[in-house]
Image: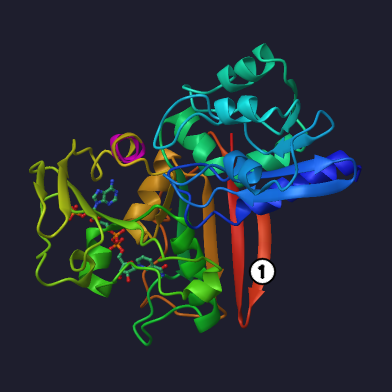
């Protein structure tokens, strides 16, 4: 790997450190180099806090000179959001050379940040380690390009593809369950169907320590999203409706906010099977700024996501247990799926006696 690539990869590695906390913002890392020496490093860690470029410039112990190069994995912003435009800070700093891995897909920035930098005499190169940069912000990109969150479907399955086992509460091992909490932590929201609330009464929270997640400050708990068409679930009975975390109940009855319990009820159209998933995804992306959604589906919900082909990944935690006919199959096997798209294997990981299999959906 040449030096320039090495520096950009360094910025990308830094960006990843923010993945449990940056939402709805993208993961951004920045380094400033002079000759062969890295002078400053930083990453964006929380929406409303300084962006990576601003921190890197603040941390720089030396006066800016013409030889310095700034490496950033994403185009700097040029608008005022919760913080000011990074382009202004960069221009004011006197930095004259910038390497950017990719343009920002957010329409308020896309290309405009680069234009402003160049207009102010800064040499900007785009595209170094672009594929690696896309990978670490696939959720942010999906939200802006597809107007929906990046959707991960996660199930624990037995060898014979059962998702329930009458003989045991859990299908997968302790290690698999701990691993799945990293996916919860990474997600802005977790979505389940009404039957899973009824049968499992899950808390739907992240149960990992700050040390395990390597985050400072408090752990972000994902928004809990429940699909309950006829509002038949008793909110005083199930754990998922308790606590301070925001809850959203999509239904076909009413739109209302219960501020005391932090529950938003949102009425959406009912389709032949269940609530309109496309509309729900649009609402989650636009009104709640959800960039990454983890779905923990039962048979019905999983089948419906597959039928509609609106998801990006499937993660299976496959245990060696054989359940047999007494367990619920993970999907409706009478249907056929993925007529227009296909899955490719992304990775396989051994977790004690289980195997974690990660598939990516391709067009
Ligand atoms: N092993 C695992 O990883 C895992 C994960 C999750 C669940 N489970 C198990 O799965 C079982 C529940 O599965 P399930 O198939 O009975 O139910 P489910 O998939 O959890 O929920 C389905 C219900 O959600 C509601 N819904 C609303 N909109 C929907 C839509 N667009 N598509 C699909 N459903 C929609 C419907 O109920 P309304 O008409 O009331 O709205 C529907 O009956 C439980 O026993 C649980 O333990 C296992």
Q: Secondary structure at mark 1?
A: strand
The residue most toward the top is: 119
Q: Residues within 10 Å of mark 1 (few under 14, many from 20)?
A: few
Q: Nearer the viewer, residue 75 or 290?
A: 75
The percent coordinates of residue 182 (x first, y second) are: 51, 66
Range shown magenta:
279-285
- Residue 134: image quadrant is top right
Report if residue 212 lies within the magenta region: no
The quarter of the image that holds ligand 1 is bottom left
The residue pinned by badge 1 equals 349
Q: Could you tell me how many numbered marks the image carries? A: 1
Q: Is residue 281 magenta?
A: yes
| Predominant SS along the magenta part | helix
- Furthest-bottom residue in view? 167
356 left or right of 171 in image: right
The answer to whether residue 288 is seen in the rendering is: yes
Residue 242, compared with residue 2, is above or below; it is below
Foreground residue among 19 and 157: 19
Q: Residue at x 62, y 53 (%)?
A: 16
Q: Quadrant of residue 300?
A: bottom left
Instruction: Give residue 290's position: percent from left, percent from top.
Output: 38, 44
Task: State which quarter of the image contains the C terminus.
Answer: top right
Front residue (pair 315, 140): 140
């Amino acid at each position: 790997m040449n030096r320039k690539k090495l520096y950009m990869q360094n910025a990308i590695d830094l960006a990843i450190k923010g993945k449990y906390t940056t939402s709805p913002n993208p993961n951004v890392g920045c380094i400033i180099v002079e000759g062969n020496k890295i002078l400053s490093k930083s990453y964006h860690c929380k929406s409303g806090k300084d962006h990576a470029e601003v921190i890197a410039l603040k941390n720089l112990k030396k006066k800016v000179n013409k030889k310095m190069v700034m490496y950033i994995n994403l185009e700097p912003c040029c608008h005022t959001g919760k913080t000011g435009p990074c382009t202004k800070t960069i221009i004011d700093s006197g930095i004259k050379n910038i390497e950017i891995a990719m343009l920002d897909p957010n329409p308020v920035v896309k290309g405009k940040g680069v234009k402003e930098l160049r207009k102010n005499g800064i040499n900007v190169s785009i595209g170094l380690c672009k594929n690696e940069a896309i990978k670490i912000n696939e959720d942010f990109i999906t939200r802006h390009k597809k107007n929906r969150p990046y959707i991960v479907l996660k199930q624990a399955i037995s060898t014979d593809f059962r998702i329930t086992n009458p003989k045991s509460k859990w299908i997968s091992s302790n290690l698999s369950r701990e691993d799945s909490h990293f996916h919860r932590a990474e997600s802005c929201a977790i979505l389940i169907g009404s039957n899973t609330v009824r049968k499992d009464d899950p808390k739907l929270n992240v149960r990992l320590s700050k040390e395990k997640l390597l985050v400072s400050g408090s752990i972000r708990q994902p928004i809990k999203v429940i699909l309950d068409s006829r509002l038949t679930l008793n909110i005083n009975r199930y754990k998922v409706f308790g606590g301070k975390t925001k809850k959203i109940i999509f239904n076909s009855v009413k739109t209302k906010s219960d501020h005391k319990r932090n529950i938003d009820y949102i009425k959406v159209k009912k389709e032949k099977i269940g609530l309109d998933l496309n509309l729900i995804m649009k609402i989650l992306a636009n009104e709640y700024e959800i960039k990454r959604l983890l779905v923990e589906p039962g048979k019905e919900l999983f089948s419906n996501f597959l039928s509609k082909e609106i998801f990006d990944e499937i993660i299976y935690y496959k245990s060696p247990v054989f359940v047999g006919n007494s367990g619920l199959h993970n999907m409706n096997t009478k249907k056929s799926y993925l007529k227009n798209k296909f899955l490719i294997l992304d990775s396989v990981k051994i977790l004690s006696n289980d195997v974690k299999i990660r598939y990516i959906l391709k067009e």
